[in-house]
Image (tube, rainbow, N blue to C red):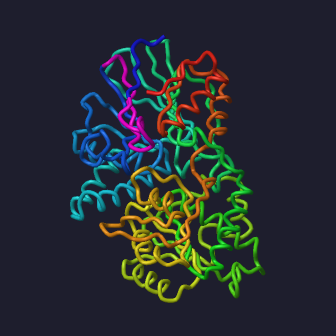
Amino acid sequence: MVNKVDVIHHGAVDGVTGSCHELRVRGKDGILIDCGLFQGSEASSGHDGNQGLAIDFPIEHIRALVVTHCHIDHVGRIPHLFAAGFDGSIYCSEPSAILLPLVLKDAVKVGVTRDQSLIARFVKLLESKIIPVPYGQLTEIPLPIEDYSIWIKLQRAGHILGSCYVECDIKQGAASRRVIFSGDLGAPYAPLLPPPRSPYAADVLVLESTYGDRVHEGRKIRKQKLSKIVERCLKDLGVILIPAFSIGRTQELLYEFEDIIHSNKGRFAAKNLPWEELDVIVDSPLANRFTKVYQQLRDFWDQEARTKLAVGRHPLSFEQLTTVGSHGDHLSIIDHLKNTGRPSIVIAASGMCSGGRIVNYLKALIEDSRTDILFVGYQAKGTPGRTIQKYGAKNGYVNLEGKTYDIKASVHTLSGYSAHADQPGLIRFVKGMHRKPGEIRIVHGQDRAKVVLKGKLKEICPHTNVLIP
């Protein structure tokens, strides 16, 4: 048995954001798995007092960073990691190596500086540190410790393009110990991406629990509900606003809308509005750039998506799709929709309504009773999205950029459209392991989700030490 291997958590312990975990060997050298941003109420709740930005733990001994995927709650503190003195390599999957500079360039521009020369220097430094790792390839992370080594293998996680879970083999001579970090696991049968497969074995598993207390509906039922909600909303002859993250959720929604429109040719989405004429608007320059990358990386799509391409369909660039680029076009679209009430679907970031162009849509349309707001992803505590989701049905209000708005729009939640595995998916991930872990550490979830998942895991792994850090 390898001596002295510690797992230390620097985020995603008290909630679902700020993912950052350390694997430390013999108390001397370590690697980080993710370095994410705290969001919502978690940004100021017992962390660093600076909106969850600062690196408030020692990093002198950190030799490398391994990125599971490119969502901000997993990579958003990387600029601050550099500022704190980190000079190691960043290992990630091949798709993430392309996506990461795009994600962080935008994050730095929004949250740190608009100085183009500083942004360019940061991106150049970031790109020099990235080491792309093919899925399934065993890769050594050099350590200055005699007789010790860390080898990583990235496996598909099915969460967003490029997402992975990380198998870490710590070797001491002939002995070895395996620690697996799940990152965020995807739901089965999600659009575009193949689902995660269970690892063979682990000594320690660090497992996410975002939906550890919930069961998602099947994809067929979810798509039917999405179609029905859209039809019902369009009867108001108003706009459907869908807050969605620029990477992952937006592309999944486009894929589903293309299929719904294709399947409903000759039918009406609303009075005098055939499905073929329904406008689907993506108003996010970043999402549009990510969508182009998704198209370029179609080799990483699942078989269903590649089959559609083979018969001439274009799941991410269909005829009814309009993409908005400039800020001027963004404002013009809002004025047009506000004044005409033309039935349309608008997908815009951010997914929790805490910034981005969706906020301008909300400010313009949330007090119009013809508007519908459709949530298809998790809304963290303390975000405007959670407020709208919670109080929309109670004639409540929400604060957007310092001003209070009455919620007169109808509010809907379709929770099945989550990029996260539900409770059965998480259980299946563990159950499918040939050799169960001696220890499972449950992270990245609210208290109830973690407690419920712990109980379920104990049922299938009675001899495993299941703990909530």
Residue that sits furthest to the right in the current view: 266
Q: Quadrant of the C terminus?
A: top left
Residue sitting at 60 percent across and 52 percent down? 300
Residue that sits furthest to the front in the current view: 394
Residue 392 x/y as whole percent: 51, 64
Residue sitting at 51 percent across and 59 percent down? 389
Residue 337 x/y as whole percent: 50, 83
Residue 402 x/y as whole percent: 30, 67
Residue 188 x/y as whole percent: 67, 46
Q: Is residue 370 visible?
A: yes
Give the quadrant of residue 357: bottom left
Q: Residue 328 or 295: which is nearer the viewer?
A: 328
Give the extent of the magenta segment. 9-27
In this picture, is 153 found above or below 360?
A: above
Residue sitting at 31 percent across and 37 percent down? 88
Q: Was residue 13 drawn as part of the magenta stretch in this picture?
A: yes
| Circle count | 0
